[in-house]
Image (spheres, rainbow, N blue to C red):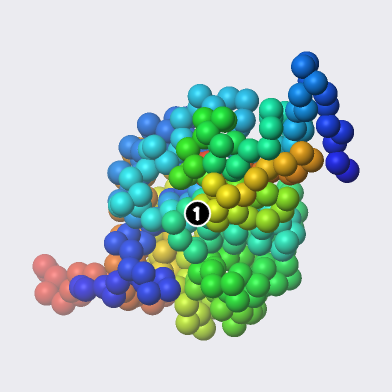
Amino acid sequence: MTDSPFVIAGRTFASRLIIGTGKYSSHAVMARAHEASGADMATVAVRRVNISDRSRESLLDYIDTNRMFILPNTAGCYTADEAIRTARLGREAGLSNWVKLEVIGDERTLFPDNEALIEATQVLVREGFIVLPYTNDDPIACRKLQDAGAAAVMPLGAPIGSGLGIQNPNNIRIIREFARVPLIVDAGVGTASDAAIAMELGADGVLMNTAIAGAEDPVAMATAMKHAVLAGRLAYLAGRIPRKMYATASSPVEGMVGQ
Amino acid sequence: MKPETKKAKGDETMVQITLNGEPFEIERPLSVVALLDKLEIDARRVAVEHNLTIIKRQRFPEVIVNDGDQVEIVNFVGGG
């Protein structure tokens, strides 16, 4: 079966898995996990340079930016203004006008502040940014973001770093129904089956960080995620059988010995 | 608030700036390029904000950091 290419804002990606760069035990492990994942887009955070300790290696020394597209995020921003400022800095530090937009509403859950998120999306779209907003698994919020000019909608599967898997599959399915822009499930994946479920629900892609970086063997988990995303996507395209309450025999009921 | 200019030995004035939220002293006003050079920071991998205005990389040589200025230098770190 042939799949349509994964395109966001006119740019085609080879992999439907988008990968983070945080929380790895070392840059070297991250580089190996990235390689194993097959991903060609990676998120990064924008932070102050450590002035007193310049000896620390640069993250970008461990990412082949010819192969990997860099997506700066606005993680840690709690207002639209902070997120907009961070997005602008990320654009200057990087090579593109793309941003994974986060406006966090609460420290414990890291759930997005939808109102501020929509406001920041409008501003950044006007400034020419390609905006990929991290949002609640709320179909109405996703619709408003799409209307505001977001290049994709990225509903969470579960809270960031929780590893709980897709908590509200029905909402993801509803978002799939009306989304005209790519749907990327961002956050909440704990293991390979979660990524497969996201794809089976019709997501165009899955974004994850902790599930790989925090695994006992990040390189093996990255490999598992690569296969899970492929398997889930293929299952979605293949069209699953309907769910039924009772059994339907797989073997012929006629021609039984002794009939 | 503008930090007071300190007098250094030999009566030369030191330039006091706020760099990434911390007080920082330089001998004289410097261009952004010169400041990055002094800090041993690769200019190609950072973004610089000068008094809350983002400075385009091609303007690094001409923008001068003066006494009392606020400078933010950011780069990419691991994130999700």
Q: Residue at x 78, y 16 (%)?
A: B9
Q: Is residue A216 left or right of residue A224?
A: right
Q: Is residue B18 left or right of residue A203?
A: right
Place residue A28 in its image quadrant.
top left
**Quadrant of the drawing holding the C terminus of chain A:** bottom left
Place residue A150 in its image quadrant.
bottom right
Q: Residue at x 36, y 61 (%)?
A: A16
Farthest-out residue, top:
B9
Q: From this viewpoint, is residue A45 visible?
A: no
Q: Residue at x 73, y 61 (%)?
A: A81
Q: Is residue A91 above or below residue A202?
A: above
Q: Could you say which is closer to the camera, residue B59 or residue A50?
A: B59
Tell me residue A195's x, y (percent). Answer: 43, 56
Give, as a three-letter code, the residue at label 1.
Gln
Pointer 1 residue: B58
**Quadrant of the drawing holding the N terminus of chain A:** bottom left
Tell me residue A26's x, y (percent). Answer: 44, 30
Q: Is residue A243 left or right of residue A32?
A: right
Place residue A50 in its image quadrant.
top right
